Image (cartoon, helix red, strand yellow):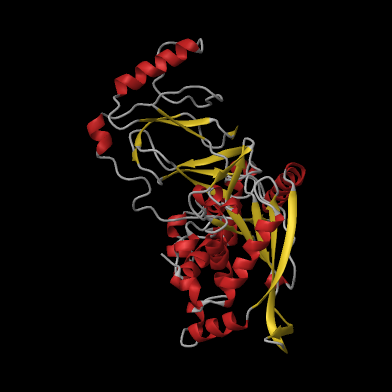
């Protein structure tokens, strides 16, 4: 039997609240399927499962706040029988001093750590179960919560998010279209349920507190070192302008994309900056998954991962980045995007900042920052010219790298940005 436990969806997450199950007992699940929606201090996250099997029981009810690591559900492994699972449960209950009989259904208020069985269809019926989420319309968790508060059916709301997903703005727009009296009555009817939900202000404050706690822990535990390098971008700007010349505005590649790609490619040569420091040792990552810092409209910051960014062509990386930012702000991220980042990249150029001095997001071991591209005096082949220049900075963890390697890493980023043709050639 496989135990599915509440995963940690960030260094600052100690607990989470189950908002919704996306599966039921008897459903067959596969690696990567979304099985639940969990509310963290930052947002509501679609939680994926990383095992294959058949859902045997749901051990946690929605609206329960539990610590990371709590058993949420149990699965039958492929080929495992219900009888074997029942026998395992009886043995476990016996060792815990609990009843030996198997409960027929999940209690209305299952306690933390309790084992509540639910009826499981026969293996043949389970194999015929539909894949979780098939045919369901995508609704962001924030939109679903607001729709419940207003008494609206999300299925009747026109979605404007990615792939037609219903966003919070869509729900608010639909609410304004109905009669005010109906909206007021619906909200009043749902008040007891909604009262338990955190408000936008409460969520923003909770997020700030969680971020502050993680950053304080980072500065306390991680021996940071900081480096910065100025990189001329004239060739990159010319290359990007030629690439975007015949494209519509919506299809153009933004400057942030080649900057991100250069970081990803440079990490191939400097793997000690790409991974996690866990239990006193460095674990190098098997893939390059940069977490991209995204500011949220309701306040706060989140840094979901773009998987295997070093293998993506520039156009594909642009599409992935645009999709990730849109879903981050609509609060429709997946758990793997919240947990898989192997380094963080932050770009504050649009805010007018020239130099970024970031704090490493544990358990990562490095953070790269880019400031604003500015025209500065630059010497090229002995001639003083005016060139567009960006300052790239590195915050590194002295337990896994040093200033010498960090400087070489920044130099490699600079080399790639000054030879932009390499950014696409290295894809794949």
Percent coordinates x, y for residue 182 in the rendering: 56, 56
Name the image quarter holding the C terminus: bottom left
Seen from the viewer's position, the closer of residues 312 and 384 is: 384
Q: Is residue 305 above or below residue 100?
A: below
Residue ID at (48%, 64%): 320
| Number of numbered discs on residues | 0
Seen from the viewer's position, the closer of residues 345 and 37 is: 345
Name the image quarter holding the N terminus: top left
Q: Is residue 234 above or below residue 342?
A: below
Q: Quadrant of residue 75?
A: top left
The reply to whether residue 178 is visible in this rendering is no
Percent coordinates x, y for residue 214 in the rendering: 70, 45
Seen from the viewer's position, the closer of residues 304 and 255 is: 255
The residue positioned farthest toward the front in the image shown: 382
Residue ID at (69%, 78%): 389
| Residue 270 placement, left or right of 370 | left
Seen from the viewer's position, the closer of residues 338 and 205 is: 338
Q: Is residue 246 above or below residue 140?
A: below
Residue ID at (59%, 45%): 276
Percent coordinates x, y for residue 307 in the rendering: 48, 56
Percent coordinates x, y for residue 141 in the rendering: 53, 51
The reply to whether residue 33 is visible in this rendering is yes
Residue ID at (63%, 44%): 363
Q: Quadrant of residue 355?
A: bottom right
């Amino acid at each position: 039997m496989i135990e599915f436990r509440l995963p940690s969806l960030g260094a600052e997450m100690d607990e989470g609240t189950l908002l919704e199950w996306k599966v039921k007992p008897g459903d067959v699940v596969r690696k990567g399927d979304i099985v639940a929606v969990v509310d963290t201090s930052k947002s509501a996250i679609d939680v994926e499962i990383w095992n294959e099997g058949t859902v045997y029981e749901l051990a946690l009810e929605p609206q329960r706040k539990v610590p990371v690591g709590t058993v949420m559900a149990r699965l039958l492994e492929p080929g495992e029988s219900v009888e074997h699972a029942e026998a395992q449960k009886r043995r476990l209950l016996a060792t815990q001093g609990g009843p030996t009989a198997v409960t027929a259904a999940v209690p209305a208020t299952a306690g933390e750590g309790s084992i509540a069985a639910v009826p499981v269809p026969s293996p043949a019926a389970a194999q015929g179960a539909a894949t979780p989420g098939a045919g369901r319309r995508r609704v962001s968790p924030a939109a679903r919560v607001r729709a419940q508060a207003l008494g609206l059916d999300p299925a009747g709301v026109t979605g404007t998010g990615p792939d037609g997903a219903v966003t919070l703005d869509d729900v608010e727009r639909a609410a304004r279209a109905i009669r005010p009296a109906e909206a007021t009555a619906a909200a009043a009817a749902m008040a007891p349920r909604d009262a338990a939900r955190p408000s936008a202000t409460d969520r923003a404050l909770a997020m700030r507190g969680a971020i502050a706690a993680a950053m304080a822990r980072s500065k306390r535990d991680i021996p940071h070192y900081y480096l910065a390098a100025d990189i001329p971008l004239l060739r990159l700007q010319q290359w990007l302008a030629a690439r975007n010349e015949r494209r519509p505005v919506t299809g153009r590649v933004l400057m942030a994309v080649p900057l991100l790609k250069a970081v990803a490619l440079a990490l191939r040569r400097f793997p000690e900056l790409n991974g996690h420091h866990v239990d006193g040792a460095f674990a190098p990552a098997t893939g390059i998954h940069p977490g991209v810092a995204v500011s949220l409209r309701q306040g706060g910051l989140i840094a979901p991962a773009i998987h295997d960014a070093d293998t993506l062509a520039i156009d594909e990386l642009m599409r992935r980045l645009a999709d990730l930012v849109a879903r981050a702000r609509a609060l429709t991220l997946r758990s793997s995007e919240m947990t898989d980042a192997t380094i963080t990249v932050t770009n504050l150029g649009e805010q007018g900042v020239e130099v970024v001095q970031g704090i490493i997001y544990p358990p990562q071991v490095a953070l790269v920052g880019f400031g604003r591209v500015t025209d500065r005096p630059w010497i090229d082949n002995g001639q003083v010219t005016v060139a567009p220049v960006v300052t790239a900075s590195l915050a590194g963890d002295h337990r896994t790298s040093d200033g010498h390697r960090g400087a070489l890493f920044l130099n490699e980023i600079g080399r790639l940005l000054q030879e932009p043709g390499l950014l696409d050639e290295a894809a794949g």
